[in-house]
Image (cartoon, grey):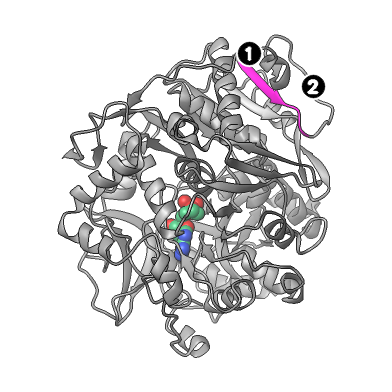
Amino acid sequence: MVDGTDDLLTRGRTFAPDPDFAARATAGPELAEEAGRDRLAFWARQAHERVSWERPPTETLDWSDPPFARWFADGTLNVAVNCLDRHVDAGHGDRVALHWEGEPGDSRSLTYAELTREVKRAANLLTSLGVVAGDRVVIYLPQIPEAVVAMLAVARLGAVHSVVFGGFSAESLRARIDDAQAVLVITADGGWRKGAVSPLKPAVDAALAADGPATVRNVLVVRRGGNEVDWTEGRDLWWHEQLEGVADEHEAEAFDAEHPLFILYTSGTTGKPKGILHTSGGYLTQVAYTHATVFDLKPETDVWWCTADVGWITGHSYVVYGPLANGATQVLYEGTPDFPAAGRWWDVVEKYGVTLFYTAPTAIRSVMKAGREIPQARDLSSLRLLGSVGEPINPEAWLWYREVIGADRLPIVDTWWQTETGAIMVSPLPGVTTTKPGAAQTPLPGVSVDVVDDDGTPVAPGGSGLLVVTEPWPSMLRGIWGDRDRYVETYWSRFGDRYFAGDGARRDEDGDIWLLGRVDDVMNVSGHRLSTAEIESALVSHAVVAESAVVGAADEATGQAVVAFVVLRDKAKVDLDPEEAAASLRRHVAEQIGAIARPRTVVLVDELPKTRSGKIMRRLLRDVAEGREIGDTTTLADAAVMGVISAEMR
Ligand code: WT7
């Protein structure tokens, strides 16, 4: 657990920066001083130095209509040109942009010159399919170079991509295509996962079936899995066929800094996912800045590897836009860490000489479980920095990461941020911060956060409360697609002028920040965000379910796990075998949302614990799911119900 008890494990151990590392670090303490003197001037400098503008901005922040921020609003740029052409123009065309490693062991390296050409061709193809600036394009692809090419081609045209993680179901895909009113879907026949082809095209076909969204004109299909696919003539087109003979010259247009770049859907506290909207100039500024300083990037010599899928925000910011804006060389890997055997990741590190490695605590815990012999049998000496993201990292995993993967020497950066923040907000700076296992610690230079109590009063050192961001930041979300009010309500209604992140946090005696997990009905399973309400509505859409309540229960492997309490309809209770019913409900959730949402445990109960006003008391269910003594039940309408549920859980 990440709270005061971690001192037992770490005994308050801290890790001062290595002097050699510090001497060569990209960022020094002067960065915080500069930002402290004049925050906006600091961001303006970052924007001018890290981004190539067609027309450099003279304005920094327009906060005249809060919470709707405009950053660098009179500047114009093309985001794709920033990630590609400018590096070629600067003489780095032969530098490798992507070392791609397919799961079956095939591989492909693309230089900046090659990637630029591919993106230009793809942009020409999209234009020929009628895609224009502002159109939405849904991308549903495996972790292959075409995913990066597709995103950048869309961005190059000033169109808006919405990448949907390949693990989401047809139903989730349909809802996202529909909400974004996409004109084009880019997908693949299938991708490789744990030794087999996992088909993708059938989900697109199902999402676009007769009653599906009518806005989609075409489906572009990349051939990757080689699996058989159904074909809708006139709508479906093979990517490789369409690209034949397409010119690799493309004149990119510049767009306003506030031109939309992408929508990425994420779970909120209701059943309907939120389309988080990000724009161009501010987003690019902050992802480039954070990628360079938090990870100490030296683009000429480093090999960057972020293990996240491009379907998540981490993949957007630290696989695509940050690293490519910075001209980095990186590894892109299609598969899972343990295929064909545990140790595949470390083979990849060795093969490409990875120097900077960024992954999630859940992955660290799973490699920990497989045993230290596995990484120790590989040469990991190329590594010089390790990063963590997605959930609080437990000190035990942090210490193991440093000792076993980091040769007891490498700096670790625990980076806190969200889909909404677009880029890293709270993190140690390598070579500057003395790190504490389990803490994200300090807001980055230019970022202002606080920990406050329910009334919005900052907590004293040693106190716990809620994390807020107190000043606008360049890569902040600009809203929720198509839902102005929900944006204001979700993030800005609680404390008015401060952004409410939804996370609990503690400030220790030194003023350092420790993240404590979500405080709302959002779960974090393996670093992925899931909504209890969304899973509940999937469950009640099943014919046998009368009512359900879902909670996130602490889980050693995945951080939190989905536990569903379900009341069956009376007839189903009689007709169904309980085990079969539970199995079919788990399957149903995976079909409705995606495999990541499949409940670990389904508990069939006769009744749910409710207050007299009918509100489900999730706190009590969480107690049961985590095997704790049940807390205060005095507000329950029927005090006996918890006794029955606890018995059923056992
Ligand atoms: C939520 C955001 C940011 C990319 C991955 C997840 C949790 C994220 C940390 C961290 C503690 C963390 C928070 C946050 N979270 N990083 N270093 N320490 N918690 O993006 O799906 O938007 O989820 O992930 O709870 O609110 P996301």
Q: Which residues are magenta?
A: 218-224
Q: Identify residue type, mark 1.
A: Val
Q: Is residue 606 magenta?
A: no
> Which residue lies at the image location 39% right of the left edge and 57% below the top edge?
293
**Residue holding disc 2:** 230
For the residue labelled by badge 2, is the local secondary structure a helix, a strand or a loop?
Answer: loop
User: Of the residues tagged 2 and 1, which is closer to the observer?
Assistant: 1
Residue 306 placed where, x, y %?
57, 53
In the rendered image of this protein, does residue 204 appear above or below residue 20?
above
Q: Is residue 174 visible to the viewer in this orientation of the structure?
A: no
Cβ of disc 1 within 8 Å of ligand 1? Answer: no
Looking at the image, residue 529 sits to the left or right of residue 71; the answer is right
Q: Is residue 575 visible to the viewer in this orientation of the structure?
A: yes
Crowding at mark 1 (Cα within 10 Å: few <14, some 14-19, many 20+): some
Looking at the image, residue 40 sits to the left or right of residue 475; the answer is left
Residue 185 placed where, x, y %?
60, 24
The quarter of the picture where the C terminus appears is: bottom right
Quarter of the figure with residue 434: bottom left
Question: 164 and 246: which one is in front?
Answer: 246
Q: Identify residue type, mark 2.
A: Asp
Question: 154 and 560: which one is in front?
Answer: 154
Q: Is residue 222 magenta?
A: yes
Residue 558 placed where, x, y %?
62, 64
Crowding at mark 2 (Cα within 10 Å: few <14, some 14-19, many 20+): few
The numbered mark at residue 246 is 1
In the rendered image of this protein, does residue 37 appear above or below residue 69?
below
The numbered mark at residue 93 is none
Name the chief secondary structure element in magenta: strand
Looking at the image, residue 162 sits to the left or right of residue 381; the answer is left
Residue 631 placed where, x, y %?
47, 78
Q: Which label's residue is closer to the chain start, 2 or 1?
A: 2
